Amino acid sequence: MGRIVLKDVKKSFGETNVIPPLNLEIDDGEFVVFVGPSGCGKSTLLRMIAGLEDLTAGDVEIDGNVVTEVPPSKRGLAMVFQSYALYPHMTVRKNIAFPMRMAGIDEETQKAKIEAAATSLNLTDYLDRKPGQLSGGQRQRVAIGRAIVREPAAFLFDEPLSNLDAALRVGMRLEIMELHEKLKTTMIYVTHDQVEAMTMADKIVVLQAGVIEQVGSPLDLYHAPRNKFVAGFIGSPK
Ligand code: ADP
Ligand code: MG
């Protein structure tokens, strides 16, 4: 569960071609980072995988099934955004329970899953608070908790830490990596931050103007950047 394949995926907005046909394979359980400068198409690509953006051409496959026409809620993926998108009037517990309630999961199971997610994310003491009574880092944890309880085939993160201060970002980065260790679920993580990419990824996808410049491990990219753009962006001496 969690193998994602992009086949000749293309995206144009009107006359503007943002993603020329692009191919990519993401293995089950991989931590993949899409990195590249602002405007290069990272969010568009992630949104196409999630089903939040139509494809101009091509197909998205999840675990061998073509999902190009499948609505977002039926793809079995969970998306975590930089704006936390929590319900301000609901407690943390209710926020985390929300997707399970929508899916008609029984109360007992909901309770167990909330407890487990809260333990993983150090939120046990905050379950009865409302988002307004939490720090930025805690709110981001709640957003991740709400994703975890859906037991998605993959987590899609779009610059989830960019609203946090530098010190908090380091901690949250480690927490997301720990979560990946524990769940072993595919994670696709979008960032424009080279340090995040180099420290978190199993596999980095370097994008420039919608084109994949290189795909490889952090060490591959560091030691053997394929061109000047990758070398400059990743910061290796070559
Ligand atoms: P990134 O996430 O890498 O910063 P985006 O995927 O948000 O980049 O955007 C890629 C390009 O597509 C940008 O040039 C952006 O202006 C354009 N774009 C994104 N969404 C739309 C839209 N809804 N309509 C027109 N152009 C868009
Ligand atoms: Mg973006």
Image (cartoon, grey):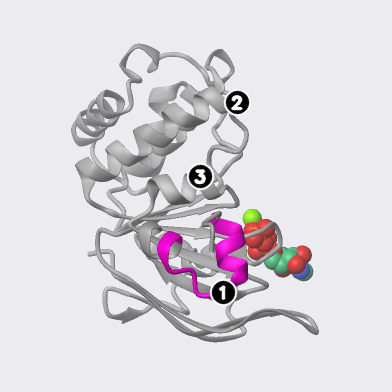
* Mark seen at residue 217: none
User: Which numbered disc, 3 or 1, marks the residue that appears first in the sequence?
Assistant: 3
Q: Residues within 10 Å of mark 1 (few under 14, many from 20)?
A: few
Tell which circle, 1 or 2, labels the residue nearer the N-terminal end.
2
Q: Quadrant of residue 37?
A: bottom right
Residue annotated with mark 1:
227
Callout 2: helix, strand or loop? loop
Element at label 1: loop
Depth check, mark 3 against mark 1: the one in front is 1
* Amino acid under disc 3: Val
Residue 228: say if magenta.
Answer: yes
Residue 111 picture location, percent across and down: 24, 28
Nearer the observer: mark 2 or 3; the answer is 3
**Residue 78, image x and y in percent?**
41, 52
Residue range highlighted in magenta: 222-234
Principal secondary structure, stretch drawn in magenta: helix
User: Which amino acid, mark 2?
Assistant: Asp
Quarter of the view holding residue 154: bottom left
Residue labelled with disc 2 = 165
Residue on which the image places disc 3 = 195
Side of 86 relative to 144 (left or right): right
The residue positioned 31% from the left and 80% from the top of the image is 65
